[in-house]
Each structure stands twice: as C-alpha cells, then as structure tokens.
Amino acid sequence: MAGLAVTPSPVMWLIMSFFVCYLIKKYAPKRITIPIVTLMGLSYIPLIFITKNVSIIIFYIIAGITGAGLGIVITMNTLLSQRVVPEDSVGVASSMLTLGRTLGQTLMTGIFGLIFNLSINNSVHISNSISFEQINNFISSTNHAYLGNKMDTVMSTIVLKGMHSVFEVVLIIFIIILVINILDKNNEVIK
C-alpha cells in the first residue's frame, strides 16, 4: 500500500520535468520556486492532522503534488547549475549538485527518524502502560500483534503523533525555503 500511495510522485516528476525548459526561459528561478514550495507546504498541512482512518486518496494527491514540485525544482536546479558555470566545469557542477542532493536525503532521513523516535519516546515516557518494544512490534510488518482495541488505539495515537512531529518539521523547512527565496534579490531569467 505504501508503495502504491507514492506512485504518483515519480509519475508527476517525469511529466513535469518536460516543462522546465519552458519555465526557466520565461521566469526567474525564484518565481518558479516560490509558488511550488507554497503549494507543497499547503498540501502537507493535512498530514499534521491525519488520523488512522484517513483515506488513501489524500496520500495520492500529496504524492502527486510532491512529485510535480520536485520534478520542476530539481530538474531546474540541474539545468541551472550546468548553465551558470563555465563549459569545462559542467561535470563538476553536476557532480556537486548530485552529491548535495544525496547527502541532503541521507542527512534528512536520519533527522526525520530522530524526530520520529524522540516523539515516540516522549509519548512512551508519558504513558507508563506501553513500552518502546511494544511500539516497535506494533509498527513492524512481521511482528505486528493484535493487543486489543484499547492498546491498538493508544499505540496508533503514539505513532501518529510521531508522524505529525516529522511533518511539522517538514513544514518548518518549507517556510525556511520560502523565506530564502523571497529574500533572494536575483530576479533575472537565466538564459
């Protein structure tokens, strides 16, 4: 189900990447990035409030918006990084962009995991009736055990709170990206 829920992301990424050449010829990079980051941020707000009964359709929509946004922004950044450097440095620019993206993904995976675990640990300490091991078994697809409606509800709430914490941080990152782009004084179309 999780794989299916994120399927719109790579599909929209591919489709939207075809429009990047048109966009960068007509608009300054910040004029492209600001509406995309705003739309992505707004689409992530519901993730702070989701419950375990949320429809899977919301994930399809958010994955599609995320894929479309990343398809434009990442493709645009790749093209721009190759355009603004001397011709003999195109390979280095592309490599540095890829390295930065890979390091960013790796670092943020660790940070999001840390935020998720800290939130769960905090909830486990507040609730003396549940252990971290029970939460791990509850999340695990191989060890998931039915503990009864009351315990499953409590553990679902704890896990959702951890996910909400991650999405709150994502929204803060979107706000930082938005502010940086708004403050950027460069309004030139890069040709």
Image: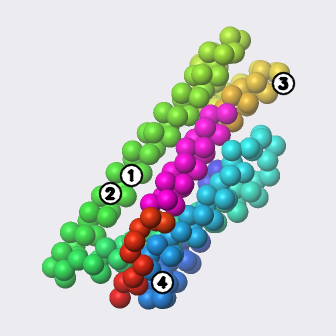
**Which residue in the structure is indicated by mark 1?**
104
Give the residues drawn in magenta, as a range.
Answer: 161-180
Task: Indicate which disc, 3 or 2, sits on the residue closer to the N terminus.
Answer: 2
| Residue lying at 60% horizontally and 45% vertically, measured from the top left | 167
**Which residue in the structure is indicated by mark 4?**
27
- What amino acid type is highlighted by mark number 4? Tyr
Mark 2 or mark 4: which is in front? 4
Q: Quadrant of the C terminus?
A: bottom left
Q: CA distance from mark 2 to mark 4?
A: 24 Å
**Element type at marker 2?**
helix
**Which residue in the structure is indicated by mark 3?**
149
In-front residue for pair 135/39: 39
**Which residue in the structure is indicated by mark 2?**
100
Whole-percent x, y for residue 151 in the image: 78, 21
Whole-percent x, y for residue 83 in the image: 29, 81
Whole-percent x, y for residue 180 in the image: 44, 60
Q: Residue furthest top?
A: 128
Q: CA distance from mark 4 to mark 3?
A: 54 Å
How packed mark 1 is, by other alpha carbons closer than 10 Å (few <14, some 14-19, many 20 or more), is few
Q: CA distance from mark 4 to mark 1?
A: 26 Å
In-front residue for pair 84/158: 84
Q: CA distance from mark 3 to mark 2?
A: 45 Å
Q: Is residue 165 magenta?
A: yes
Residue 156 lies, with reference to residue 172, above or below; the image says above
